[in-house]
Image: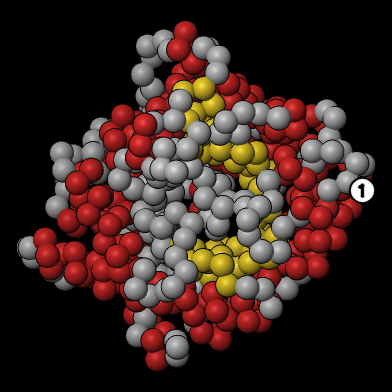
Amino acid sequence: MINIYEVAETNMMIEHENLDVRTITMGISLLDCADGNVNKVCENIKTKISKYAENLVSTGEAISREYGIPIVNKRISITPAAIIGASACKKEEDYVKIAVALDEAAKNTGVNFLGGFSAIVSKGMTQSDELLIRSIPEALSKTERICSSINVGSTKTGINMDAVRLMGEVIKQTAELTKEKDSLGCAKLVVLCNAPDDNPFMAGAFHGVSEAEAIINVGVSGPGVVKYALEQLKNADFETLCETIKKTAFKITRVGQLVTQEASRRLKVPFGIIDLSLAPTPAVGDSVADILKVIGLEHPGAPGTTAALALLNDQVKKGGVMASSYVGGLSGAFIPVSEDQGMIQAVEAGALTIEKLEAMTCVCSVGLDMIAIPGETSAATISGIIADEAAIGMVNQKTTAVRIIPVAGKKVGETVDFGGLLGHAPIMPVNQFDCSVFVNRKGRIPAPIHSFKN
């Protein structure tokens, strides 16, 4: 049982250390919206989303006021659209219609993002999957709040290299179609391996087919809180360091537990999961990179970075799972470059490269996130980066992802500003050696030997 006294204990965290609930995300099944007529599918989608989510934003705001807990975002995730549109969509333009309908539904409910313009193609692509994937550039250029995710691999199935190759091309096309906004469409597009069905964070959120009709998932945050707690330790040993992170993660997660329970009760939608991920923002002091500095690194990227991040990620999970019976999603520490002021500074100082970020993704949540690269980067190179990251996820039985932005017209050394929570980012250099022969091979990379668990 959670009571208001537990929330009161976090007042200092909220007022001075950037503690917030990053998102309340309502997952909604749209399986019953399928139809042979695309216009009917669009109508069904808007009706279903309105039915379940019409009070989502107002409920989140009411909880925030009553408990004094900032709830930054209210979002929706849906059943992967490639499933919903399979019968109705015969061409790419049909999926664009569905994206526009989803965008209208998101605007009508007042949420800031809707995730699930997605396809799960880890072993192969259906005709519907491929149509949706090829429609992504136009869909993201014609919508404001839609997020798209494509799962191209898993530990059980291997990596679908045909999909990886296609996604390199799609990312380039999306960058070009949204170049007037500094290729912003790519910030709403992520390629995953081992994507979870219950992730509340964008751009990778979708409502898995094994989920209930509707659920409430909450993503907590609080890197500033962890940083403040560690600053009080000075030269403490590793045991003390770990105990402090665990205790802090416990308190942060209890706040999320309260918000999830209240949202679930008021909206009459079942409690799904709490995602424990430390999600940074561009705000000074709300940074995973700054935690790594407090642990003892001059900048993220210095020798010892991967070990420090592994420690942080593990202790956050250990503390959080004691605070809630339903922990899921990604749960750990995000390291998006543009959304973390400390990561930006590390890149600008020359301490952090894409290759080092890739190494860090072996031990943290997700992967190469919100990284801006030169617009001239080839589709093949982007596909190679996706393949590398997917391999890390496949072999290590974890979720990995690539959200990379080849900013049209920008070169290394320049900066791009996406605004809001998406922040700003320096254009990072990319290895220029060619990988096109590799990524153009057809088929899939087989699952690793340890995937056979039956």
Q: Amino acid at mark 1?
A: Lys
Q: How many callouts does the rendering have?
A: 1
Q: Which residue is mark 1?
A: 40
**Left or right: where 379 falls relative to 322:** right
Pinpoint residue 369: horizontal percent, then vertical percent: 44, 41
Kindly tell me whether residue 186 is visible in this rendering: no
Q: Residue at x 48, y 47 (%)?
A: 423
Q: Assign a secondary structure to mark 1.
A: helix
Above or below residue 128? Residue 369 is below
Q: Residue at x 92, y 48 (%)?
A: 40
Q: Identify the image quadrant of the N terminus.
A: bottom left
Above or below residue 74? Residue 86 is above
Pinpoint residue 373: horizontal percent, then vertical percent: 45, 28
Front position in the image: 349 or 231: 231
Kindly tell me whether residue 47 is visible in this rendering: yes
Above or below residue 16? Residue 294 is above
Q: Residue at x 67, y 73 (%)?
A: 269
Front position in the image: 57 or 400: 400
